């Protein structure tokens, strides 16, 4: 009896995740673009933040 229940649950789980399987390839292809965009945005933000901080440090040194 437990073997039948286990197989039934396994089939339900496989069917549930099988419905989402076609979306996995679409999502991965889209995520590559999103990841690249996010990395470039974070890099640009970090660069601008570093420039801003160095400008503030330079102004403090000039005032002294």
Image (cartoon, rainbow, N blue to C red):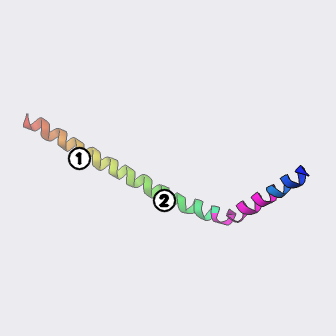
**Rendering coords of residue 2 (x, y %):** 88, 50
**Other-residue count near label 2 (Cα within 10 Å), few / some / many at <14 / 14–19 / ≥20:** few
Q: Is residue 6 magenta?
A: no
- Element type where label 2 sits in the image: helix
Circle on res. 34: 2
Circle on res. 52: 1
Q: Nearer the viewer, residue 16 or 45?
A: 16
* Residue range highlighted in magenta: 10-23
Q: Earlier in the sequence, mark 1 or mark 2?
A: 2
- Element type where label 1 sits in the image: helix
In the image: residue 8, left or right of residue 40: right
Across the whole image, how many numbered discs are drawn on residues? 2
Main structural element of the magenta stretch: helix, strand or loop? helix
Q: Are marks 1 and 2 in contact (CB under 8 Å)?
A: no
Above or below, 45 against 53 in this view is: below
Q: Quadrant of residue 7?
A: bottom right
Residue at 54% in and 63% down = 30
Above or below, 37 against 49 in this view is: below
Residue that protrudes farthest toward the right in the picture? 1
Residue that protrudes farthest toward the top in the picture? 64
**Rendering coords of residue 18 (x, y %):** 73, 63
Query: The C terminus is located in which quarter?
Result: top left
Residue at 53% in and 58% down = 32
Q: Nearer the viewer, residue 31 or 20?
A: 20
Q: Quadrant of residue 60?
A: top left
Residue at 22% in and 41% down = 54
């Amino acid at each position: 009896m437990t073997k039948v229940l286990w197989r039934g649950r396994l089939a339900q789980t496989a069917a549930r995740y099988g419905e989402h399987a076609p979306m996995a390839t679409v999502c991965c292809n889209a995520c590559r673009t999103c990841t690249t965009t996010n990395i470039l945005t974070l890099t640009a933000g970090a660069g601008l933040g570093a420039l801003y901080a160095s400008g503030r440090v330079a102004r403090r040194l000039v005032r002294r």
